[in-house]
Image (cartoon, helix red, strand yellow):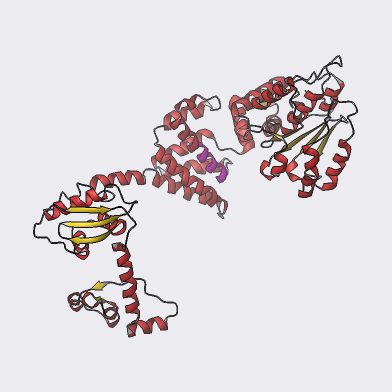
Amino acid sequence: MAEENNNQYVALARKYRPQSFEDLLGQDALVQTLTNAIKNNRLHHAYILTGIRGVGKTTTARLIAKAINCIGPDGNGGPTIHPCGECENCKAIAADRHMDVIELDAASKTGVDDIREILDGVRYKPVNARYKVYIIDEVHMLSKSAFNALLKTLEEPPAHVKFIFATTEIRQVPVTILSRCQRFDLQRLSVEILVNLFEKVLKAEKISYDLQALQMVARAADGSARDGLSMLDQAIVLGNGNIDAETVKNMLGLADRQQSFAVYEKLLEGDIAEVLRLVHELYTNGATPMLILQDMVDITHLLAKVKILPEFINDASLSETDKEMCKKLCSAPISILSKIWQMLIKGLSEIQYASVQIDALEMILMRIAYSASLPTPADLLKELKKKSTITDTGSSDILQSNVADNSVVLDTTADLVKFMTAKKQPLLLFAIKNDMSFKEFKDGYLHIALSDKADKNLILNFRTFLEKTTGKVWKFDIDYEPLGETLAFQEAKEFDRDKKNISEYPLVKAILEEFNGAKIETFIRKSIEEAENEETDGFDTGAMLNENEEEE
């Protein structure tokens, strides 16, 4: 426990700051590495510690400084992973008053001159300690020139100097610095670890507590011990020395967890009236629309995780309410949860820009409630495939309703396209137009070039179609080589040519000139008979191409 003034209250985050590596929570890899380094006398000259706020970066740096400078109660000890805490070096470092352990806040001292002050003192040996230790917090805040000034000394410092850097933004640290340091990534603390820490602290403080309240604080801390202890401090004051779930819920502005699950259950059922009633009740009790929506996101993730990893339902971080509701709602399929997740995430951005957030929240939940029970695209596709007589490129049973006609003669690709269009085979025709080109075409025989991207069943489906509809045996010669002009390419060329011809019609040309920027998007080809049988104005008649006059 850190030294404290008995006349002044010390915040829990400072009072219970780890004073040994045994107290350092959730950083087993770091502790094991340092243990082996000290045991084998392989201490590196520079370390960099990274992680989110409040996981113990600066604390770890001080512990390393104590470990390598501890001399033991009798003054004859060497570097140890278990600093005694009793020698003068340990006491001075813990109290932040050791003259050989220099701490620099790079957030306030970012310039090259500040680094030069450090470098000027590097060549001098420590006064009392075994090593002179420089701890630079938020090192990513240093300027480019400051980093450059540090490089050479950091690479080859005197034997009596150790550097320890701490940062929350490791990506902003130049790679030239990183390559000269041993890096440790401090892990977020799990909800279970934080709850155990809170219980230990509250028992030491002799304060009664509710386990559910501690779980709320641990989740809100988001892996940070300092944030969690600060919130715990606030909860103690708000609860007048007693921490219960209701107090913490009001303090954090959280929605009632059980009511949030009730809202989610009604969402899955599509009962929008009950959803709106429960949301209004949560809003009246102080929960903000953003917090309600975030709670829905958390519940969606929790249900999906339990669905994929059933054993997670017994995790210590889950409250009894969470466990009961997960068991109740675990029947929701992953496809539905994924769809709800996408709409909730989209809703988070929508609600930020809404003029009235509660209205935006209601609209988001209405959208989810009405769509939650709808089938997913995958379900729709399966249903369509059951009802449809075609597959992706036309399957072998697509022609069950077609009767063979021996009188059909297909001598050209134009005959083929017209025939397949009449037989209503759009997907198969699309694949033929785009994935093959015809070198020779006559009734009963095809010589084609096939794309390497073509469906593996395309030729089988094509042959099946021809044989079942014409009643003839068709022979195929296939070349696997670069395609020539496909039917799709030829149609595109014809379309561009015809569009150009249409634009030369006097009336069309006049319209295009009159309306600046106007252009022809599409047109319809009709035969003379079709055109004569329709009542059309001058523009439509002029815009129609006669199939018998395509060469004009």
Q: Foreground residue, 77 or 21? A: 77
- Front-most of residues 450 and 318: 450
Q: Residue at x 76, y 24 (%)?
A: 19
Which corner quadrant of the image does residue 20 belong to? top right
Outermost residue to the left: 407
In this rendering, would 509 be left or right of 62? left
Q: Position of residue 425 (x, y in %)?
A: 22, 56
Residue 31: percent from the left, percent from the top?
Answer: 69, 24
Q: Is residue 343 left or right of residue 47?
A: left
Picture layout, residue 408 above or below residue 527? above
Which quadrant is the C terminus positioned in?
bottom left
Can residue 389 be spotted in the picture? no
Vertical order, 519 against 338 (above or below): below
* Residue 479 figure quarter: bottom left
- The span picked out in magenta is 288-299
Q: Within the magenta stretch, is there residue 201?
A: no
Where residue 363 appears, x then y in whole percent?
47, 50
Left/right placement of residue 417 relative to residue 226 reads: left
Q: Is residue 499 above or below residue 42?
A: below
Q: Tell whether 281 sits left or right of 62.
A: left
Q: Can the viewer see residue 137?
A: yes
Rendering coords of residue 270 (x, y %) = 39, 43
Q: Is residue 289 magenta?
A: yes
Between residue 245 and residue 513, name the one nearer to us: 513
Which secondary structure dominates the residues rendered in magenta? helix
Q: Nearer the viewer, residue 534 or 179?
A: 179
The picture quadrant where one finds residue 80 is: top right
**The N terminus - image quarter:** top right
